[in-house]
Image: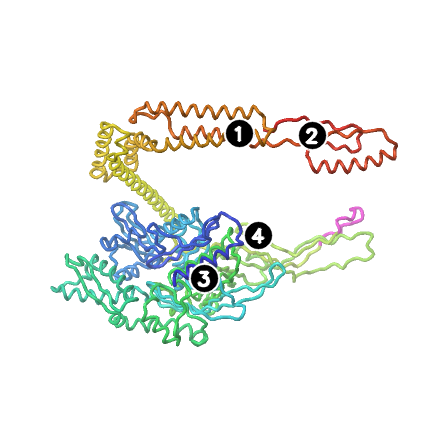
């Protein structure tokens, strides 16, 4: 089914991108899960699929979301998976879930999953710092730095797939990820040198993939997306519909979807089912072991058991019973057992009921019944568990659940479509509007001298599911500096691990100074502070800027209107204008911009001699001043943003690690090349072909050199650099290349000679064809080709005779490359002669006779028609235009 689904996706996408703007740009999407990541690429290069899943170095479409530090090397993905059971304390997992989390939360989270990596608290931000076996500055990393490493690795997979540089990406996030966590993820992307077009909620990616190839013009559909991944579960209600719009003068139907609501359980996922099995099997092994030993205290034993349990759970999804075997689980003792699906379902009995809670909450909030749902789409790896599907079917009253989407890849594929829509260089041929909303409601809180705690100092500014992106502002009547706090609306819906409702704090400064500066002026209304907020496309709510708004009414002297002497009627002079308005929005800290409403109605075209000056008059004007206030973020705790110094240090550490990894990969590649050269050469030196073209002494000396380097390779190369491997490989090739060359020339040289002789035979027929069918070809050019062919034939005969006298152990008399080079030169000469065009026929000049004026007029018309016809046949002819002189006859020439 997955293969058929993938085929349908590729077929549709190939049609979808037919009308894309031609560009070399490529974008990517990253599904950053807690245990694994997927990468999709949108690429416009000819010959490549417009959208595809990037594969890793093991040719897999899904990569473990792991990092490890072992033996001085950093390993990411599949390389770390191989170390997870042997060195559990060196492998770091679930890192995206630990962004902007307090130290205590991270510590308890790792313990709950029996993860044994070492952490310590960061004194400034109260986050966990992961301690590795590195040295110095490469020993400690924050979650942002770790996730940055993963993101850069993911983009590397995308670039390998697209064979081009990729900077713009869309990253998917679970719906419950809060503002601090999303901001921290963007910081990680910045450290990785990635431009994030948007963070998109996972269910929106799935909805895009679901709706892009469907038609909703016949009516709206309510679709429920149910996702149970490794660490969390959510249910998202999405309404698909269509609207009509004008495009190129035609009415077209455009699909769109709107997210109605989302409910989740961040503590319920596939890994929690696995933990039930782990606990059950750990108890079973402890009973077998006896002596009061508990393997839960052994990180290595628990890592081995968890690895095997993950496989067992997958087996139980397709079978009623699964064997379990772990070699040397503890104290060199093996563990073998069996588990039935029935027992597994019994262990997870309470999980099945919890799994229905997000669905029930969404339906209750929306007022929909199960019959109102058009489809229930399952995504996420844990939805493959048969018992979970059965419980959902029972609750929803359905015989079958919808599985049109690939449970693993739907989110990342849909997110890639969103990336293409947001990018500058790629546009989709078919549109699908996306209306997503803020998962959390946000509250604005004000605090400061003179501010009373009432409904004005705590306001709900962003209700739940408010459209993304959005901008808003609030005005505060106040004349002193104050503090602004942004908080979640309710404790009932708050990101996991968040210690406080407040997630951001700001100082708004400059209002006191502005109030004092203008206190002596005639202030017509109380001073206000205008606060401007934004809810970004990524779901991040921030205070962007603040202005002081000051309205002053005062008398201003302005020139009276100039009146012309020619006017028969004089305008009545307006004495006051207190009602004029100002809508100026531009402001700066040092410069005030205002609009006093004065307009000059005098006619500048009237001569100054016809006007007279009436002097000045006073008008009452209302002026609005806007003064930019300073906004300083002072958020503390785990959500505290990194300082400029911390960002610079983190980038330095990551760049140094990248260079170290590049050198490590280069060293490994050169070592493999050296090892492969030694093995292949030793085998070939003993073959009959090499015996024919090399002496015993030459081969023996070369074999001794190979053995010498091989001994060094397996005894003294532990700390060898890439350059050392390269030097030894170059040294061996300097000895072996002449032997390899003679070996290759045994077959290559006769083949080249045969090719040359065959071409010379064919050339004779070509020359005969010239002489018979192309009489216009210059004879000297044909003779030149014949002479060059004879030279090649003689040279080849001489060299072959010389080669027969040359020892097979010596330098060949000639090479295959020389033969091909001479043949190519001869072919170029033949082609140059072949390209000589047939000359055009020479036209005789028209005889001009003296005629009467009437005849000359008629002749002129005729000549004009002939000239026009002549010009349409040949270029470069001079126009006659009725001239009595004859045209000059062009000289015949050869065109080379």
Quadrant hosting residue 84: bottom left
**Quadrant location of the C terminus in the rendered image:** top right
Counting residues from the N terminus, which is met first, the one under dot 1 or under dot 4?
A: 4
Q: Are marks 1 and 2 in contact (CB under 8 Å)?
A: no
Query: Could you say where residue 115 lies in the image, as x and y percent from the top left?
Result: 26, 58
The segment highlighted magenta reads 603-616
Q: Which residue is mark 1?
A: 767
In 3D space, how far apart are the residues under numbered discs 1 and 3 (Cα atoms)?
64 Å
Q: Is residue 429 placed above or below 265 in the rendered structure?
A: above
Query: Can residue 172 be seen in the rendering of this structure?
Result: yes
Q: Is residue 674 left or right of residue 874?
A: left
Query: Can residue 490 be seen in the rendering of this structure?
Result: no
Label drawn at residue 592 = 4
Counting residues from the N terminus, which is met first, the one under dot 4 or under dot 2?
A: 4
**Comparing marks 4 and 3, which lies closer to the viewer?**
3
**Comparing marks 1 and 4, which lies closer to the viewer?**
1
Q: Residue furthest left?
A: 291
Q: Is residue 300 left or right of residue 443?
A: left
Q: Which residue is mark 2?
A: 842
**Comparing marks 3 and 2, which lies closer to the viewer?**
2
**Comparing marks 1 and 2, which lies closer to the viewer?**
1
Counting residues from the N terminus, which is met first, the one under dot 1 or under dot 3?
A: 3
Q: Are marks 3 and 2 in contact (CB under 8 Å)?
A: no
Q: Residues within 10 Å of mark 1 (few under 14, many from 20)?
A: some
Query: Could you say where residue 389 lies in the image, as x and y percent from the top left?
Result: 35, 71
In 3D space, how far apart are the residues under numbered discs 1 and 4 (Cα atoms)?
89 Å
Q: Residues within 10 Å of mark 3 (few under 14, many from 20)?
A: many
Q: Residues within 10 Å of mark 4 (few under 14, many from 20)?
A: few
Label drawn at residue 209 = 3
């Amino acid at each position: 089914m997955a293969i058929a689904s993938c085929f349908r996706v590729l077929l549709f996408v190939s049609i979808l991108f037919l009308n894309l703007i031609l560009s070399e740009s490529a974008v990517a999407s990253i599904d950053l899960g807690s245990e694994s990541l997927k990468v999709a690429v949108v690429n416009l290069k000819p010959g490549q699929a417009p959208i595809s899943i990037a594969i890793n170095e093991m040719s897999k479409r899904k990569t473990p979301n792991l990092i490890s530090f072992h033996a001085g090397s950093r390993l990411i993905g599949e390389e770390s998976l191989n170390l997870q059971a042997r060195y559990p304390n060196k492998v770091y997992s679930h890192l995206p879930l630990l962004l902007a989390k307090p130290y205590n939360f991270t510590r308890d989270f790792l313990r709950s999953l029996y993860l044994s990596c070492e952490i310590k608290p960061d004194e400034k931000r109260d986050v966990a710092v992961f301690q590795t076996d590195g040295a110095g500055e490469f020993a400690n990393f924050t979650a942002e730095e770790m996730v940055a490493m993963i993101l850069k690795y993911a983009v590397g997979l995308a670039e390998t797939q697209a064979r081009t540089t990729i900077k713009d990406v869309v990253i998917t996030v679970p719906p419950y990820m809060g503002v601090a966590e999303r901001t921290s993820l963007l910081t990680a992307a910045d450290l990785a040198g990635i431009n994030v077009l948007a963070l998109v909620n996972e269910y929106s990616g799935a909805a895009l993939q679901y709706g892009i190839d469907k038609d909703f013009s016949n009516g709206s559909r309510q679709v429920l997306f149910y996702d149970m991944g490794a660490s969390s579960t959510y249910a998202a209600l999405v309404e698909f519909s269509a609207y009509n719009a004008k495009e190129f003068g035609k009415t077209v139907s455009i699909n769109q979807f709107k997210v109605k609501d989302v409910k989740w359980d961040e503590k319920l996922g596939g890994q929690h089912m696995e933990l039930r099995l782990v606990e059950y099997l750990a108890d079973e092994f402890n009973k077998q072991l006896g002596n009061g030993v508990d393997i839960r205290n052994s990180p290595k034993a628990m890592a081995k058991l968890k690895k095997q349990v993950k496989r067992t759970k997958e087996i139980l999804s397709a079978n009623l019973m699964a064997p379990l075997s772990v070699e040397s689980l503890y104290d060199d003792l093996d563990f073998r057992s069996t588990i039935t699906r029935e027992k597994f379902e019994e262990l997870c009995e309470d999980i099945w009921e919890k799994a229905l809670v997000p669905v029930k909450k969404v339906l209750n909030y929306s007022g929909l019944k199960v019959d109102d749902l058009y489809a229930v789409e399952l995504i996420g790896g844990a939805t493959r568990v048969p018992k979970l599907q059965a419980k959902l079917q029972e609750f929803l009253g359905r015989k079958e659940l919808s599985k049109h989407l690939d449970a693993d890849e739907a989110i990342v594929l849909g997110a890639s479509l969103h990336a293409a829509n947001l990018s500058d260089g790629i546009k989709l041929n078919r549109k699908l509007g996306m209306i997503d909303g803020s998962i959390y409601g946000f509250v604005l809180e004000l605090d400061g001298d003179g501010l009373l705690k009432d409904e004005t100092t705590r306001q709900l500014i962003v209700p739940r599911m408010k459209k993304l992106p959005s901008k808003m502002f609030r005005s505060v009547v106040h004349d002193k500096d104050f503090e602004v706090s942004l908080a979640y609306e309710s404790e009932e819906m708050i990101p996991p691990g968040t210690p406080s409702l407040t997630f951001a704090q700001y100082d708004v400064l400059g209002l006191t100074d502005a109030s004092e500066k203008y206190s002596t002026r005639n202030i017509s209304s109380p001073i206000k502070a205008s606060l401007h907020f934004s809810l970004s496309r990524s779901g991040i709510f921030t205070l962007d800027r603040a202005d002081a708004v000051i309205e002053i009414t005062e008398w201003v002297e302005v020139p009276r209107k100039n009146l012309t002497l020619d006017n028969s009627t004089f305008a009545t002079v307006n004495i006051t204008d207190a009602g004029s308005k100002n809508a100026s929005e531009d402001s700066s800290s040092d410069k005030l911009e205002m609009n006093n409403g004065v307009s000059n109605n005098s006619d500048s075209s009237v001569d100054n001699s016809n006007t007279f000056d009436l002097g000045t008059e006073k008008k009452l004007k209302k002026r609005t001043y806007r003064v930019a206030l300073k906004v300083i973020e002072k958020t503390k705790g785990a959500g505290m943003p990194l300082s400029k110094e911390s960002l610079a240090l983190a980038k330095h550490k990551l760049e140094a690690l990248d260079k170290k990894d590049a050198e490590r990969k280069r060293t490994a590649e050169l070592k493999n090349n050296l090892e492969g050269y030694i093995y292949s050469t030793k085998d070939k030196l003993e073959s009959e072909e090499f015996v024919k073209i090399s002496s015993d002494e030459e081969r023996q000396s070369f074999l001794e050199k190979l053995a010498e380097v091989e001994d060094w390779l397996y005894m003294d190369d532990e700390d060898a650099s890439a350059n050392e491997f390269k030097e030894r490989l170059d040294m061996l090739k300097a000895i072996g290349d002449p032997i390899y060359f003679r070996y290759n020339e045994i077959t290559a040289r006769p083949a080249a000679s045969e090719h040359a002789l065959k071409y010379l035979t064919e050339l004779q027929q070509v020359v005969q064809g010239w002489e018979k069918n192309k009489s216009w070809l210059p004879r000297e050019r044909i003779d030149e080709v014949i002479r060059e062919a004879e030279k090649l034939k003689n040279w080849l005969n001489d060299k072959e005779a010389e080669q027969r006298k040359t020892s097979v152990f010596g330098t060949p008399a000639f090479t295959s490359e020389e033969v091909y080079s001479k043949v190519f030169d001869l072919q170029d000469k033949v082609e140059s002669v072949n390209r000589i065009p047939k000359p055009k026929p020479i036209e005789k000049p028209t005889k001009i006779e003296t005629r009467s004026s009437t005849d000359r007029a008629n002749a002129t018309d005729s000549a004009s028609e002939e000239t026009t016809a002549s010009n349409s046949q040949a270029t470069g002819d001079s126009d006659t235009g009725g001239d009595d002189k004859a045209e000059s006859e062009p000289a015949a020439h050869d065109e080379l």
